[in-house]
Amino acid sequence: MILETPFGFVVIDKPAGLTSHDCVSRLRKVFNMRKIGHSGTLDPLVTGVLPIAIGNATRLISYLQGSKAYKGIIQLGANTNTDDLEGEIIKSRIWPLINENDINSILENFRGNILQKPPIFSSVHIKGERAYKKARKGEKFDLNPKKVRINKLNLISWSQSKGELLVYVECSTGTYIRSLARDIGETIGCGGYLKKLRRTKAFDFNESHSVLLPERAEFYQEINKPKVLAPNIFFEHMSSYKLISEEEIISWRSGRKICIKNNIDSLKVAKPNEFDDTSFNSKNILVFDKKNRIIGVADLFEKFKLKPKVVFNAIG
């Protein structure tokens, strides 16, 4: 079976000043293809790990799983309307004389499961409209707090003279580091905003996978294109099944259910991660061909039947 190529992920070390969509647009020209998309927005100010799906891997983005990690500087002594450096300062205060032990005691309040209110300049939907669009128009509104998880929140350094906290954060998808900076500043009693941020990990992608964004928005020869990483290692959190026979392959590509009772050993059940104590999930089974290439995603039902939900190279 011939699969569409390229197929996988390019992990860009996003520079400051560009949006995630800017990076996608440039890669579309580099690879001369439209089927390219990112796995989650990074603010223009933020640098670091930005996984971008190439080809059919765009249909796997929703199945990515895992935490995200950041290194950032929190500036104490002021609040901005965007909760980061790009916004207007709306309130200034003097930060207190405080030591690292005091700061670590405060950070303890933000570890684990917490309720967090998103910034008003965010992509949260309010009655069909993005919050940042309403904020730009000067509309007054309030956002409901949502539950997020902070797996790690470590103080790397503290500058009393500058009022700067350098922190490492590992958190669940959907966490706003800008909100974390704001709330830590309020708890200290002087306000705070996010001055600088770099993402070091997104799902199972990290800095070791990342490459620089091509400088030019034009088609590149194959040898000069960014390396496309095979997707297999980034979905080890999913249970999987390998199709062996040609009959199974044809049935799969035709979108028909497949009975796996006589080949149950080909079903590999994923282990839960340290933050997920759920048992085997019969939904979202990754499907491989006999060459260990991902060819889609299925649901397992009635114990021994696979129902295709995402099929690459479908027939008909």
Image: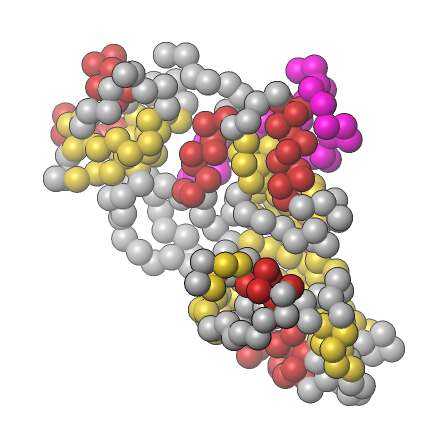
Q: Residue at x 26, y 31 (%)?
A: 308
> For residue 285, what is the image quadrant?
top left
Main SS type for the magenta part? loop
56 lies above or below 104: above
* Left or right: 251, with 288 as reference point: left
181 w.r.t. 133: above or below: below
Frontmost residue, 110 versus 105: 110
Residue 265: x %, y % from top left: 23, 30
User: What percent of the width, then of the height, locates residue 97?
Assistant: 80, 87
Q: Which residues are magenta?
A: 211-236
- Name the residue at the right extreme: 161
Residue found 77% across the figure and 31% down from its top: 215
- Is 108 in the magenta? no
Q: Quadrant of the N terminus?
A: top left
Quarter occupied by residue 81: bottom right
Counting the numbered discs, the total is 0
Q: Using residue 131 as the reference point, say whether residue 278 is left or right of it.
A: left
User: Image check: 168 left or right of 114?
Assistant: right
Residue 221, magenta (yes or no): yes
Residue displayed at 66% across by 15% down: 222
User: The C terminus is located in which quarter?
Assistant: top left
Q: Residue at x 83, y 78 (%)?
A: 160
Q: Is residue 167 left or right of residue 117?
A: right
